[in-house]
Every structure is written in structure tokens, then in C-alpha cells.
Amino acid sequence: MAALVGAIAAPAMAQQPATGDADPIVASVDGTNIRQSDIAALITTLPQQYRDIPMQMLFPALLERAIDGELLQREAKAAGVAEHPEVKRRVERFRDQLIQEQYLTDQLEAAVSEEKVKAEYEKLREQAPKAEEIRASHILVSEEATAKDIVRELDKGADFEALAKEKSIDPGAANGGDLGYFTAEQMVPEFSAAAFELAPGAYTKEPVKSQFGWHVIKVADRRDVAPPSLDEAREQIRAELAEQEARRILAELRAKATIERFSMDGQPLPPQSETAPQTQPKTQPK
């Protein structure tokens, strides 16, 4: 029974006047309006795998759930369920949780300013080690002897792109074996070790063996990797600053409080040094 109630119960649908097409009325139960925003709110209660499904597909089932929820809530209120001690206890617990989260959100939004984000971005950019990437092409074959023949053809002046199109078994053979730009970490170690030793325009004089076969590699260009822009890094920086601030707030609160711990059977536990848990805060600055 609890599972059935959980599956169909929904928050109360407020009795409001129509507000226009921005939030249209999608059902009415004895004059109580159910709006599109109510259906959207129900989507947020679904498991993650369902939340990315377009609302149009979920709408019929969720509309019926919202109607059932309104009917159940009406009957429950009439029966005085709102005064049930367990309901009051759970409402109070949920209220406390909302208050905690809102307090932390307010503190983080006030502390993690755009100026702090910019300052942290500049600091990280200055401290970040320079990274390099290259643009290279390769010809992949299954036999070492074939790869050596290709090197000899290149030594005689053969066109690398034409040979890649003709002989490479790599899926990128059609575009001359071009791999685009990449960093050393993006390729298997033996491939990167050989490729990053080459100057632009040079090719490997000895075939390079990897788990995929034998490679002949040619480098077209080298350049420093541009750091992410402030816009690209902003959200991650805000999240990290918010986590630091949340830990600071909790550590400060713990330091002011007298905290006693007990085991599961109620026995006192030895005191411990109070530090904030190393966890991501549930709320982040918007």
C-alpha cells in the first residue's frame, strides 16, 4: 500500500486564477487547477533515467498521477491525516532540511562572488603548467615489414596523405590519416612518445608498434594548449569555492558547539577533533 501511495501521491495543486499561456491549466479537479508547472515539478521526482525524456512523452501518465494526487490529498485532509503525529514529524524534518539548505545556499551565494571567481581563475591560470599539443597524421598497417616499406617510399618523396589513403587500415585513412590536434595523454604511450619527438614536417623513420598495429607518424604542427576561458571554467571554480566555503562554515559551527557522540547502542564515544566533513555541499551558488 505504501508503494502505491508513493507512486501516485503528489503535492497539492494550488487553486489559482489562470496566468496565461506561460503556465497553462492542464486539468481541473472540482475547480482546483493543475498547471503545466505542476507536471514539470513531478518530473523532478522521477528517477534520473526518466528526467531526460521529453515532457510530451511523459505528460499523459503524469497528468493522471497529478489528478490522483489531488484527489488523494483532498480526502486525506478531510480525514484529518494532516494532524497525524507521523505526518507532523516528517513535515517538520523536511522543513528543517529546507531551512538548512537555504541557509547554506544564502551563505555560499554571498561568499562566492564573481570577483572571487575571477581572482581564483587568474591564480589557477598562472599556476597551471604549460601543455603542448600536436597535429599529426598516421598510416596504420598490421605488419612491420609493410610499415618499413612505407617509410622507404616516403624517403623517396612519396606523398604521405596519398599513402595513408591507399595503405592505412585506420578508419581515418579516407582523410589522409589526419588525427587533428591532441595532447600526449590522449594517445597510447608508445604512439605519443614517438610523435612528440618529431618536429613539424618530420615523420618517424622507424615504425612505431602499439596495440593497434604498426604506425608511421607525421607531425604537421605543434602549439601550446590554450587554457580554458573564464566562461568555460566559471562553474567548476564556483563549485570548488563553494565547497571550500561550506567546509569553513561547518568547521566554524562545530568549533562553537558542544558535540557528544554515542554508539548505536547508546554508549558514549571518545571525543574527537571537530572538522567539517570532506563532502560536496548539496547546494551550490546559482
Image (spheres, helix red, strand yellow):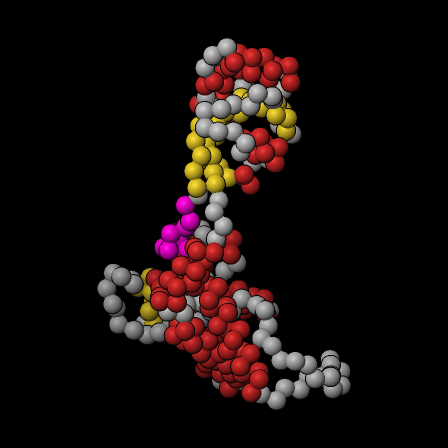
Image quadrant in which the C terminus is located: bottom left
* Residue 126 visible in the snapshot: yes
Where residue 266 appears, as percent x and y from the top left, is 74, 85
User: Can residue 230 be found in the magenta stretch?
Assistant: yes
User: Can residue 152 be found in the magenta stretch?
Assistant: no
Residue at image location 70% in from the left, 84% down from the top? 271
Where residue 202 appears, as percent x and y from the top left, is 49, 24
Where residue 222 appears, as percent x and y from the top left, is 44, 34
Q: Quadrant of residue 147?
A: top right
Residue at image location 45% in from the left, 24% down from the top? 201
Q: Quadrant of residue 78?
A: bottom left
Q: Out of 251 and 31, give the one closest to the viewer.
A: 251
Residue at image location 62% in from the left, 80% down from the top? 274
Q: Is residue 168 left or right of residue 11?
A: right
* Residue 27 visible in the snapshot: no
Count of numbered labels shown in the rendering: 0
Looking at this view, name the residue that lies furthest to the bottom: 258
Q: Is residue 122 above or below residue 132?
A: below
Residue at image location 50% in from the left, 18% down from the top? 164
Q: Which residues are magenta?
A: 226-233
Image quadrant in which the N terminus is located: bottom right
